Amino acid sequence: MTNGNGAPLENAAPPQFNVLAQYIKDFSFENPNSPASLAAQEKQPTINIQINVTANAVAEHDFEVALSIEGKAETDNLVLFAFELIYAGVFRIQNVPQDSMHPFIMIECPRLLFPFAREIIATSVRSGGFPPLMLDPVDFVGLYRQNMARQAEQQQQVKPS
């Protein structure tokens, strides 16, 4: 057996994964209809959340991964609150086979970032005068598969028949 680079497994260096930095890259919280929105909390709001992951190389083994989370809570066509958060990290990844690198970056890195982003959102919503919004755990494997399927579908539509 080989490690994917042609070297025997016994000689392969173990994978290394380090978090070099984590930070808020961009953040916005809006309470556009206060104080009316604070009084409208008797009803259960409709909450829409969108999550996206992007990544780019910043050095040979270092990657910035950004977890984007957007959300809006509405009731009776009244926006209670809205937020946009881009929470990012720089990760050093070494000795991971090339064919595993993309899924590793797009699944494992945001999985590590998510609890911190979740806390920022919960605290901000609470500070905005609402009960904290505790986001459900995210299936980053499923999100990755959806994005890959969507990209494959888009490529099929672009190809001439």
Image: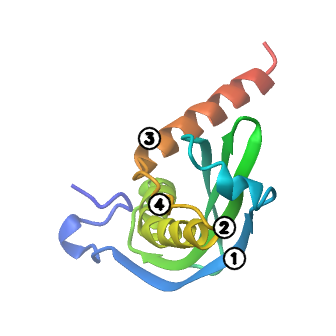
- Residue 149, image x, y percentages: 56, 32
Q: Which residue is mark 4?
A: 101
2 or 4: tag closer to the N-terminus: 2
Q: Quick check: marks 2 and 3 in contact, CB under 8 Å?
A: no
2 or 3: tag closer to the N-terminus: 2
Q: How is the image coloured?
A: rainbow
Q: Secondary structure at mark 2?
A: strand
In the depicted structure, whether residue 135 falls above or below residue 63? above
4 or 3: tag closer to the N-terminus: 4
Residue 122 numbered tag = none
**Camera-side residue: 147 or 44?**
44
- Residue 30, image x, y percentages: 76, 63
Q: Which one is in front in this view, the residue at disc 1 or the one at disc 3?
A: 1
Dot 4: within a 10 Å radius of its alpha carbon, few (fewer than 14), some, or many (20 or more) residues? Answer: few
Instruction: State the residue at coordinates (23%, 75%).
Output: 11
Instruction: State the residue at coordinates (70%, 61%).
Output: 84
Q: Which residue is mark 1?
A: 25
Q: Which residue is mark 2?
A: 86
**Camera-side residue: 49 or 90?**
49
In which quadrant will I find the C terminus? Answer: top right
Give the quadrant of residue 128. Answer: bottom right
